[in-house]
Amino acid sequence: MRREKGLTQAMLAARCGVLGWDIGENTITKIETNVRCVIDAEIACLATALGVHPEELLPAPEKLRATVKAYFASRPSALD
């Protein structure tokens, strides 16, 4: 979505900074590559910085269950 809006990672980081979230390009890379999770307040900030509704940053409803299942299947179990 960032690319669709014509924003660089630096531009998105700057927009988030104006909103009060001190985030760098490296963190944005980690978010975009699914290395770092985001909390609800961060989703709200990203959505505001991108000019979209927070729901637009989440998987489509019909893909949500599969996305969640795949995410947790790729992580080590807490029981391991």
Image (spheres, helix red, strand yellow):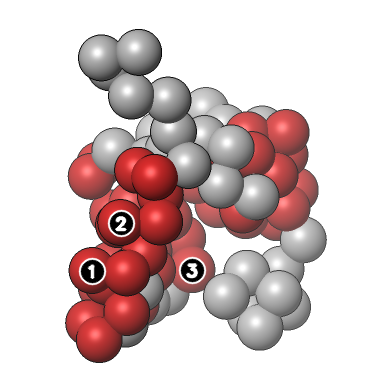
Dot 3 and dot 1 residues touching (CB under 8 Å)? no
Using the rendered view, name the quadrant where residue 51 is placed: bottom left
Indicate the amino acid at tag 1: Arg
Return the residue at label 2: 69
Can residue 32 be seen in this snapshot? yes
- Please tell me whether residue 74 is drawn above or below residue 23 in the rendered image: below
Estimate the spatial distance between the alpha carbons at disc 1 and disc 2, rounded to whole Å. 6 Å
User: Circle 1 sits in a helix, a strand or a loop, which is it?
Assistant: helix
- Do labels 1 and 2 touch, CB within 8 Å? yes
Task: Tell me residue 2's x, y (percent).
Answer: 62, 69
Q: How far across and down, in percent of the image, does residue 66 sit?
A: 32, 69
Query: Which of the two discs, 2 and 3, labels the residue nearer the N terminus?
Result: 3
Q: Residues within 10 Å of mark 2 (few under 14, many from 20)?
A: few
Q: Identify the element where label 2 is drawn.
A: helix
- For badge 2, the amino acid type reads Lys
For label 1, the crowd category at 10 Å Cα-Cα, with few meaning under 14, some 14 to 19 and many 20 or more, is few
Q: Which circle, 2 or 3, is nearer the viewer?
A: 2
- The amino acid on which the numbered mark 3 sits, given as a three-letter code, is Leu
**Residue corresponding to mark 1:** 65
Q: Nearer the viewer, mark 3 or mark 1?
A: 1
Between 79 and 44, the one nearer to me in the picture: 79
The residue at which mark 3 appears reads as 50
Other residues around mark 3 within 10 Å, as few (<14) / some (14–19) / many (≥20): some
Screen quadrant of the C terminus: top left
